[in-house]
Amino acid sequence: MRLTFLGTGTSTGVPTLACHCRVCTSRDPHDQRTRPSLLVEFDGRALVIDTTPDFRAQALRENLERLDAVLFTHSHADHILGLDDVRSFYFRQQKPIPIYADAYCMQEIQRTFKYIFDGDYPYGGVARLDPHLIAGPFEVEGLKVVPVPVLHGNLPILGFRINGVAYLTDVSEIPEQSYALLDGLEVLILDALRPRPHPTHLTVEQALKVMERLKVPRGYCTHIAHELGHEETNARLPSHVRLAYDGLQLEV
């Protein structure tokens, strides 16, 4: 299984518009972060977790040739607004693309993209999607996916565990019962927004405490704001934890 970080930035992306801080003006390409998304490739198949506003550019950058499913963590704009661009894969593959979300997220997606789901859009050029409500573990093309309930501020959202990998973005708290779903991980990808506290995201220090509790061999931070420079932050992290960056690939 190959993982590709399509995007690792926070909701504004990095550089942030109209910001001239040292990270936003950095010449290091690792400090250029599009909105957060993960590509999972296995057995000639490909699924994406979240379709960000940058999805088209991300897919072009990674030469993505097919798309077999989309999993959604939650319905915030930086995680769903690229959904329209999956239509290119529908046109190419000529089969509805399955999308997976919990009930609230699916409702919000169907409201936001009403023209896709109404079935009477008069202008053509619309993807056909196959909605699936997440109510427990499920399979995508034979690959088992375990939803992991977490909190994003007061909003219950989902992370996902796939084999020995867990992807938990936009996390401020992991409920105690969800820790049992994260035992024995090989790789944990976890929200680590910035050094300062935030009401809806983990800080770097909080993310490190989660990784320490789970004793993960490899940890990667994502959903990174412009307060964190890539090289200087990595220099302070334990050797088994790194800031992820756009385009980073892992074989698992």
Image (cartoon, rainbow, N blue to C red):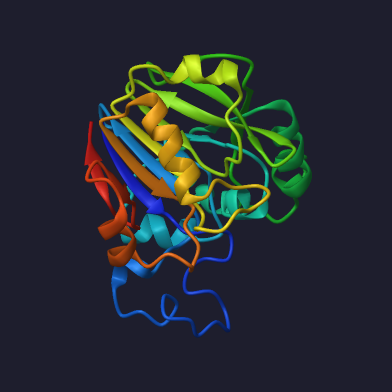
Asked if residue 20 shows in the view, the reply is yes
Is residue 141 or residue 173 the one in the foreground? Answer: 173
Q: Where residue 117 sits in the image (x, y, percent)?
A: 72, 39
Whether residue 232 is situated above or below residue 59 in the rendered picture: below
Compared across the picture, whether 159 is left or right of 102 comes to: left
Which part of the image, by quadrant, shows the N terminus?
A: top left
Q: Which of the 4 quarters of the picture holds residue 110?
A: top right
Whether residue 48 is situated above or below residue 58 in the rendered picture: above
Residue in the image at 66% along x and 54% along y: 77
Which part of the image, by quadrant, shows the C terminus?
A: top left
Whether residue 5 is situated above or below residue 141 in the rendered picture: below
Q: Where residue 174 sits in the image (x, y, percent)?
A: 57, 29
Q: Which of the 4 quarters of the picture holds residue 75?
A: top right
Compared across the picture, whether 208 is left or right of 218 comes to: right
Residue in the image at 64% along x and 16% along y: 135
Q: Where residue 34 sits in the image (x, y, percent)?
A: 46, 62
Compared across the picture, whether 128 is left or right of 122 comes to: left
Whether residue 42 is situated above or below residue 227 in the rendered picture: above
Q: Where residue 54 sits in the image (x, y, percent)?
A: 50, 61
Residue in the image at 75% along x and 52% along y: 122
Number of numbered discs: 0
Is residue 141 or residue 102 the one in the foreground? Answer: 102
Asked if residue 119 shows in the view, the reply is no
Is residue 30 or residue 230 the one in the foreground? Answer: 230
